[in-house]
Image (cartoon, helix red, strand yellow):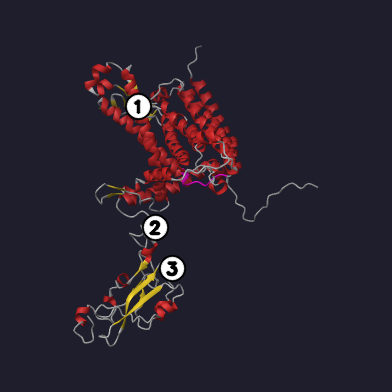
Amino acid sequence: MTQDLAVALVFIVYAMGALITFGTLLTWVERKQAAVMSDRIGANRAYIRIPFTQAKLVWWGLFHGIADGVKMLLKENFTPRSYDRVAYAIAPWIVFTPVLLVFAVVPFGGTLDPGRLIPPLADWFGQRTYPMQIAQLDAGLLVVFAFSGLTVIGAMLAGWSSANKFSLLGALRAGSQMISYELVIGLTVLGLIMIFGTIDLGAIVRRQSGTVLGVLPAWGIFYQPLGAVLFLTAAIAENKRIPFDLPEAESELIAGYYTEYTSMKMGLFMFAEFIEIAIIGALFTTLFLGGYNLPYMSDAGFAFPGGATIALSHGAVVAVQLVTFLVKVMLLCSFQILVRWSLPRFRYDQLLAFAWKFMLPIALANLTITAVLLWSHQPRPL
Amino acid sequence: MKVAYQRKRYWNEPTLTLWERAYLPEILRGLGVTSTVFLRNMGRWITGRKGALTTYYPEETRADYAPINRGKHVLTQRPDGTPQCIACNMCATVCPAKVIEIEAGFDPDDAAHPKFPVRFEIDYSRCIFCGLCVEACPEDAIRMAKEVPSLPSGDRHDMWLGLEELLTWNPQRDVAKPYPPAAAAASPGSAP
């Protein structure tokens, strides 16, 4: 029992650390990638001076995220006079907390055997093994949808409680947009659930560890290519980033539903947005890119289709799986930033028409085709 | 009678082909353009070249200033290194932004140029770089180099440049003024 607690604690610290690091790092990645994409140099002034020396660590402006955080914390916490105090205070947390909680069910590595990994602890752990996931819930995907659905309440609450017309308009837009796109996400993932036959994210990833047709890794994106595109699009829309940033369209609504928020409260909204980029990356990796799996890799090592094999120790496997997951998530974050700095913003009617008239029919068609194919391929007792 | 709203049609109304209406291909093409630029610039940075069109100001300034660009002021020097300025205040008088301040000194030993500037300061926070001071100068004592002054600072008072900054021009290229001053120092009439 104590062992389980210790392992769970390690996992939670790892996951939280990874998410917070991603959130901080992505503010820098976003600026720098946007700069390189548009022939600029980008943020490069913030530095850390090593105490008692004149050595300045600039590191390509890597510390701008910290500078932003410090700036947010030190700014005046201005609050409007006419506002609903309780709702105003808890709204940023209602946006921020579910984003972190979603990660609880995402597996970020394969099976961990602490006894084999750290021999001195072998007696204490015995034969216990742990899948690298904070909560092994059978209802994994349902938890994801439940928590990501909560953020819309935070956005609505923020807009409603600030007693500002811009905030209210932004909140209304956020509400209709997020609910519309959540529907698309649900329908998209449904196809995948039918194929894998489970909604436990750990099981879904394990199902993607083999190969299909001998060569291709059995990743969700090869079963559901259309579903993958729809999922990523709808997920970006749900995160309210350009080209779907209508709720906070600064040229129309100042800052949308967080117009009246200042200092770290506003920073929390921004931070939640950046962490959600990482969460979307993690979910997409888990559902469509085989999670922590590398092609042809199992718990024993690599086994290539030609017959060549490379045996790996347990520690190496765990390390490779953790790194693989992080690299995949990082690449997807980078892709989302690419989208954000490439595409122009929708008009509001186009945004909703896109969800209901374009993506929803395609998602339904995708679902129908998947169902028909599955039904025609299933072994029938005759 | 109620007239239904009709959107105005323009002569250059964009027309979309079916391929463009399909949305996704064009989106992918756009993403392709930006990611190509990203990868190109990233490749340049990684291989040690510069992957940006902008300059890393103020450490780096752009190389393509015109030769006649009116940038930083320079005070020309006599062969012995003293400023050619005779503190006549004509530049300060003509200056439309009133940014030049000159304090004159008197040197009885130098019969040819008894007046010289003790203090010559230009406030670059207000200078409009019109070049009138250059035209007004009777002694060719002030010119404008094509390089812009390096002024970024946390304090606006650092934007005042004095004699020591303005006398940094290297007169080696100017045929009218022999250089180095040591060679000309032997000639009569030179002040210490």
User: Would you name the residue on which mark 1 appears?
Assistant: A11
Q: Pinpoint the chain carrying mark 2.
A: B
**Callout 2: SS:** loop
Residue A8 painted magenta: no
Relative to residue B53, is residue A154 depicted above or below?
above
Q: Residue B54 carries which label?
A: 2
Image location of residue A152, percent across then percent down? 53, 33
Q: Report the residue at 21% width, 82% height from top.
A: B184
The amino acid on which the numbered mark 1 sits, given as a three-letter code, is Phe
User: Would you name the residue on which mark 3 appears?
Assistant: B126
Q: Pinpoint the chain carrying mark 1.
A: A
Where residue A305 sits, quadrant-wise, is top left
Tell us which disc is closer to us: 1 or 3.
3
Relative to residue A303, is residue B62 depicted above or below?
below
Q: Marks 1 and 2: same chain?
A: no
In the rendered structure, the answer to whether residue A83 lies left or right of residue A130 reads: right
The amino acid on which the numbered mark 2 sits, given as a three-letter code, is Thr
Q: Give the spatial CA distance, label 2 vs label 3.
A: 26 Å
- Front one among A280 and B36: A280
Image location of residue B62, percent across then percent down? 37, 63
- Front one among A151 and A284: A151
**Which of marks 3 and 2 precedes in the sequence?**
2
**Callout 1: SS:** helix
**Callout 3: SS:** loop
Residue extent of the magenta highlight: A339-346
